[in-house]
């Protein structure tokens, strides 16, 4: 498989951020318990001493189960965070390696092609993060999120951070593409093919190899730089439009203070992102900001780099699959934990009601 398809495909699904941590699971359980069915106000049947003792004895056992489940959820969350950190490091390795390289006459444009494909993969992760972030925002706005407002806001902050990391990585790669150099297009060959020197009446000039190589590379430079600048400008304009809409909504009559606060906080987040995008755009357009790559590589070195990226992409895919599996297990265990907590809450309420009606009386 070619590196272009491979890198783009793997990097596009490089991160599955957990939207449900242990604290979120606990919040969800607490919210569920608060809205659970209450024990009806009716006369409870008098129990035997043995049966009442059995019900009381179940409480510490269920509490121990909950403690054990929470500890295991902590382990799963730690695994997800560890895998996430490792994926970030592997993506960072790809970016930092390519950012230091540039093509040579021998490698033609293989390095430039790899950079371009990795940038496409990074952009796809940004699209995925934006989609997930929008889902959390809508849940917050509608009040229909299952993880609690605090957890949802933390999730949005995580996605914001990841998006900025990806944009920074794209800008770093963009700056490392070869810049235009004013090489002379033609160079004179002072000797003809017979070795007698010039002056035989024909033009002995030829197109400079340096000029041809620079033109090959800067074709990629011009295309990706234009797209990168346009993407940053479009991002700024889109965020400014959103803020104008949010400001108008926040001034509408009849909205709650909670909704107004939601709009204000969203405007502040967007302003922060606009500031970051503006700095990235200014840095990219600043004269002399390009050509940060430190060394040229030959064809064999470019091939070895391509193989390394493929291996790292395999690592990312493996860790991503593991993280997806862990995340699915986390959701399943969190749901089970919530039910167990509801069960415990119901039993405690029943015993409290029984005690209020019968005290310690038994049959």
Image: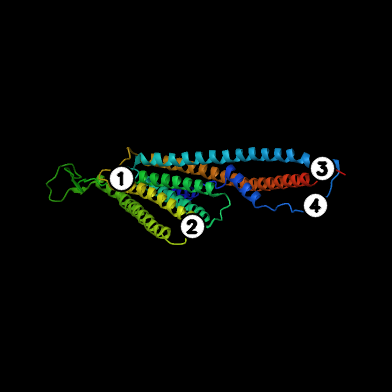
Q: CA distance from mark 1 to mark 4?
A: 75 Å
Q: Residues within 10 Å of mark 1 (few under 14, many from 20)?
A: some
What percent of the width, then of the height, locates residue 228?
A: 35, 51
- Secondary structure at numbered mark 2: loop
Residue that carries the numbered disc 3 in the rendered image: 52
Going from N to C along the chain, the mark reached first, 3 or 2, is 3
- Secondary structure at numbered mark 3: helix
Residue found at the very far right of the displayed protein: 363
Quadrant location of the C terminus? top right
Residue 271 in view in this figure? yes
Residue that carries the numbered disc 1 in the rendered image: 283
Q: Residues within 10 Å of mark 3 (few under 14, many from 20)?
A: some
Q: Nearer the viewer, residue 98 or 247?
A: 247
Q: Residues within 10 Å of mark 4 (few under 14, many from 20)?
A: few
Residue located at (57% from left, 38% from top): 78
Q: Residues within 10 Å of mark 2 (few under 14, many from 20)?
A: few
Q: Nearer the viewer, residue 106 or 53?
A: 53
Q: Nearer the viewer, residue 361 or 196?
A: 361
- Numbered mark located on residue 43 in the image: 4
């Amino acid at each position: 498989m070619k590196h272009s398809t491979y890198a783009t495909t793997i990097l596009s699904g490089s991160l599955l951020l957990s939207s449900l941590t242990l604290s979120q699971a606990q919040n969800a359980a607490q919210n569920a318990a608060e809205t659970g069915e209450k024990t009806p106000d009716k006369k409870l049947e008098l129990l035997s001493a043995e049966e009442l003792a059995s019900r009381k004895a179940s409480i510490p056992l269920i509490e121990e189960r909950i403690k054990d489940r929470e500890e295991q959820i902590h382990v799963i969350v730690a695994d997800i965070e560890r895998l996430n950190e490792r994926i970030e490091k592997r993506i960072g390795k790809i970016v930092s390696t390519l950012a230091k390289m540039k093509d040579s006459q021998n490698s033609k444009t293989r390095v430039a092609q790899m950079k371009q494909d990795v940038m496409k993969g990074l952009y796809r992760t940004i699209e995925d993060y934006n989609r997930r972030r929008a889902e959390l925002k809508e849940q917050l706005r509608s009040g229909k999120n299952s993880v609690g407002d605090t957890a949802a806001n933390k999730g949005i902050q995580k996605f914001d951070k990841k998006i900025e990391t990806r944009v920074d990585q794209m800008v770093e790669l963009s700056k490392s593409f070869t810049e235009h150099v004013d090489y002379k297009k033609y160079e004179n060959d002072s000797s003809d093919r017979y070795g007698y020197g010039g002056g035989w009446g024909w033009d002995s000039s030829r197109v400079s190899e340096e000029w041809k190589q620079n033109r090959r590379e800067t074709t990629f430079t011009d295309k990706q730089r234009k797209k990168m600048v346009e993407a940053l400008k479009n991002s700024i304009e889109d965020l400014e439009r959103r803020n104008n809409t949010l400001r108008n909504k926040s001034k509408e009559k009849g909205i709650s203070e909670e909704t107004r606060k939601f709009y204000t906080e969203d405007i502040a987040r967007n302003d922060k992102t606009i500031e970051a995008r503006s700095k990235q755009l200014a840095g990219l357009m600043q004269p002399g900001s390009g050509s940060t790559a430190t060394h040229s590589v030959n064809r064999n070195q470019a091939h070895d780099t391509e193989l390394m990226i493929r291996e790292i992409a395999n690592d990312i895919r493996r860790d991503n699959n593991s993280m997806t599996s862990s995340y699915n297990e986390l959701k399943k265990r969190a749901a089970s934990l919530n039910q167990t907590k509801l069960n415990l809450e119901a039993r405690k309420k029943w015993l409290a009601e029984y005690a209020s009606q019968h005290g310690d009386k038994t049959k």
